[in-house]
């Protein structure tokens, strides 16, 4: 999720008018048919942005000024956001590269706008009619201030240089991963245990070996199922070294520049600078929270590792005391333990969850809970397989949003799972929202873990689509970063509910229902491996904080020390931070937010304890949490919904199970 200053109701729409579909509540996503198209849109968009800022600078600061300021958000969403998204998904590398070049121009414009003293002073004077206006001004002022608007001239100029450079470095970091085209060669014998559907149609090299990428539909089944430890090792090494030495250098530059940026504002480190406007408030609070988590899972992680050692010794027929579990073993033997203890095999779920039906199932869950309807419409997008859904409010029958979905992996595409908030809603101008859901699923079906991922990411899209805020700049996922994951993490638990899973037959009558026994086994098995799961998340978050608190950041040596202190240790020569795109981008000094948000998410779930599909609870949740966006601080949203202050009781009870 990217925080931005943003813009316009009328002229903004004309840029996409030629693409508009009659059944879409908002203009369609632009075609970006060529490099020339990207460049022309970029030139026109930036020119228009400059004109709008100039007009706003001269505008009288009256009761309509805040709306005029938010019109900038509408304009940026309609002109900049599609460009910044397309560089992650367009099948043509030349178009992606052109979009990346344009994105840097927009970043330069945004950093200048963030230091616009005229607009900042006008914002402080603008009349505020209520609490929504006051919160809008508070958040917008914070963005200006964090951009350096109040710094002395020399520091302000340096701040802009750093912001522009950080955008460039982050984009290059992601490009190095996205465009690497990594392939790992295997013989058929080495892929024994891996479902044939994963590899039988894959390309082969001149020696007849199967070539697999490190996308999730290839990587996860090999790590989970390949009998050959050497095959798992090669796949794991290829994935963990994504980005390579160039990205380690980029990450070091990024973190050093962030430290310098924080010092411009009088902070000793970037962590405290970055967290001062979050729920955690400072690095010390985030660290105490992480310590409380590791205290709860540390012994569990060690006990689980002993079970994995026993499973490996049994599998290979080696003495226990001479058996060592390597990092590429953990998933494979974790699955064996689950199969032995709980009779759970994730691959066994694939026949029950065809990808398209799984998407429609996830949408049906939201329909039941939140009083909306999704309708797929024919529409030409960046790729023939990308889909468009119109989201309508059932009570009024009105279309309120659109959702774009890109389900399957391909070369050059963003290779994880994420949602881009393309357009925020704004009730003041009856503006509807748009979000893009991007995942990389196996065409042969999803595991239950992958259905959980789908619901998580859809949670972000729903947050965008069902937001109903006065101002676009306050819409949807513009909330505090250590809260933004809570609405999506809340939904992950829905896949373990038999009543919820029965919705699959509503959208896919021909799909066989998941047997109740498999669901029971999955519920039991989901508690196994929590030590390793939360131990890993704790490591990621602690590393992120330690790296950003370092005076001279050295990403790999720090990682090697910290990972080396964990039960599974560090594998010399590996460079996980080179692929840790979260902290190179918007989650830098903020990765702890995943665990922090999970605490909140589990507290939110308590309201749905009696019925996960309750339309009454779902309506309140839609209105009081999702619908409010950032119009209220996150703790207030949770309190309004739960009727009490949030607490961590549900989270720590879960850790004990």
Image: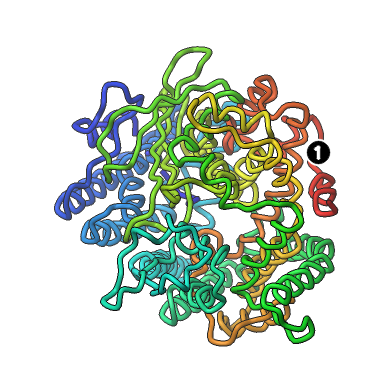
**Horizontal side, residue 277 vs residue 586: left or right:** right
* Residue at position x 50%, y 25% in the image: 509
Quarter-of-image position of residue 374 = top left
Q: Position of residue 397 (x, y in %)?
A: 46, 13
Q: Position of residue 22 (x, y in %)?
A: 27, 21
User: How many marks on residues?
Assistant: 1
* Residue at position x 65%, y 59% in the image: 275
Is residue 486 placed above or below 163 in the rendered structure? Answer: above
Quarter-of-image position of residue 298 = bottom right
Residue 124 seen in render: no
Depth order, front residue of 611/124: 611
Q: Which residue is mark 1?
A: 645
Is residue 322 placed above or below 340 in the rendered structure? Answer: below
Q: Position of residue 448 (x, y in %)?
A: 59, 46
Q: Position of residue 467 (x, y in %)?
A: 53, 31
**Horizontal side, residue 644 vs residue 378: left or right:** right
* Residue at position x 59%, y 73% in the image: 328
Label 1 sits on a secondary structure element that is loop
Label 1: few (<14), some (14–19) or many (≥20) C-alpha neighbours in 10 Å: few
**Horizontal side, residue 38 vs residue 634: left or right:** left
Quarter-of-image position of residue 206 = bottom left
Depth order, front residue of 186/14: 186
* Residue at position x 81%, y 48% in the image: 648
Is residue 24 placed above or below 276 in the rendered structure? Answer: above
Residue 235 seen in render: yes
């Amino acid at each position: 999720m990217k925080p931005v200053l943003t813009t316009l109701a009328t002229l903004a729409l004309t840029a996409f008018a030629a693409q508009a579909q009659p059944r879409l509540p908002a203009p369609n996503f632009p075609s970006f048919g060529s490099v020339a198209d990207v460049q022309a849109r970029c030139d026109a968009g930036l020119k228009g942005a400059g004109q709008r800022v100039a007009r706003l600078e001269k505008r009288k600061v009256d009761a309509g000024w805040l709306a005029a300021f938010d019109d900038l958000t509408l304009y940026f969403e309609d002109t900049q956001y599609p460009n910044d998204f397309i560089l992650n998904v367009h099948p043509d590398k030349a178009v992606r590269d052109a979009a990346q070049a344009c994105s840097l121009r927009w970043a330069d414009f945004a950093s200048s706008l963030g230091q616009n003293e005229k607009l900042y002073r006008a914002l402080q004077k603008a009349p505020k009619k209520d609490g929504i206006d006051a919160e809008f001004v508070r958040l917008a002022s914070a963005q200006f201030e964090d951009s350096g608007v109040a710094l002395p001239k020399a520091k302000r100029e340096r701040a802009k240089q750093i912001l522009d450079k950080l955008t460039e470095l982050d984009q290059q970091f992601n490009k190095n991963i996205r465009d690497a085209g990594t392939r790992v060669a295997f013989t058929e014998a080495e892929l024994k245990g891996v479902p044939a559907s994963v590899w039988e149609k894959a390309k082969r090299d001149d020696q007849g070996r199967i070539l697999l990428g490190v996308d999730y539909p290839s990587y996860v089944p090999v790590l989970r199922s390949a009998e050959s430890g050497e095959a798992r090792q090669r796949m794991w090494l290829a994935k963990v070294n994504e980005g390579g030495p160039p990205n380690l250098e980029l990450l070091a530059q990024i973190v050093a520049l962030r430290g310098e940026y924080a010092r411009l504002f009088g902070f000793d480190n970037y962590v405290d600078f970055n967290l001062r406007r979050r729920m955690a408030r400072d690095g010390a609070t985030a660290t105490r929270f992480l310590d409380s988590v590791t205290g709860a899972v540390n012994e569990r992680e060690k006990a689980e590792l002993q079970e994995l050692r026993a499973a490996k010794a049994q599998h290979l027929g080696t003495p226990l005391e001479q058996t060592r579990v390597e990092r590429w073993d953990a998933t494979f033997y974790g699955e064996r333990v689950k199969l032995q203890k709980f009779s759970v095999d994730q691959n066994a779920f694939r026949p029950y969850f065809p990808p398209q039906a799984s998407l429609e199932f996830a949408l049906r869950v939201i329909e039941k809970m939140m009083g909306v309807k999704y309708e797929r419409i024919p529409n030409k997008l960046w790729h023939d397989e990308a889909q468009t859904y119109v989201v309508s409010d059932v009570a009024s029958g009105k279309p309120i949003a659109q959702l774009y979905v890109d389900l399957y992996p391909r070369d050059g595409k963003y290779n994880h799972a994420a949602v881009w908030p393309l357009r925020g809603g704004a009730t003041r101008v009856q503006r509807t929202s748009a979000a893009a859901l991007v995942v990389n699923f196996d065409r042969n079906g999803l595991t239950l873990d992958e259905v959980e991922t789908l619901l998580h990411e859809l949670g972000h899209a729903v947050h965008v689509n069902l937001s109903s805020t006065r101002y676009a700049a306050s819409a949807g996922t513009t909330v505090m970063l250590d809260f933004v994951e809570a609405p999506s993490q809340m939904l992950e638990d829905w896949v373990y509910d038999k009543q919820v899973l029965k919705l699959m037959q509503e959208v896919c009558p021909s799909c066989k229902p998941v047997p109740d026994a498999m669901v029971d086994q999955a519920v039991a098995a989901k508690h196994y491996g929590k030590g390793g799961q939360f131990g890993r998340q704790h490591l990621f978050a602690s590393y992120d904080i330690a790296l950003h608190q370092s005076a001279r950041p050295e990403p790999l040596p720090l990682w090697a020390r910290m990972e080396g202190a964990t039960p599974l240790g560090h594998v010399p020569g590996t460079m996980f931070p080179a692929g840790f795109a979260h902290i190179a981008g918007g989650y830098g000094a903020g990765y702890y937010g995943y665990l922090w948000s999970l605490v909140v998410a589990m507290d939110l779930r308590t309201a749905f304890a009696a019925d996960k599909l309750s339309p009454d609870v779902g309506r309140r949740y839609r209105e009081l949490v999702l619908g409010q966006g950032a119009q209220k601080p996150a703790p207030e949203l949770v309190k309004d919904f739960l009727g009490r202050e949030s607490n961590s009781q549900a989270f720590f009870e879960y850790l004990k199970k």
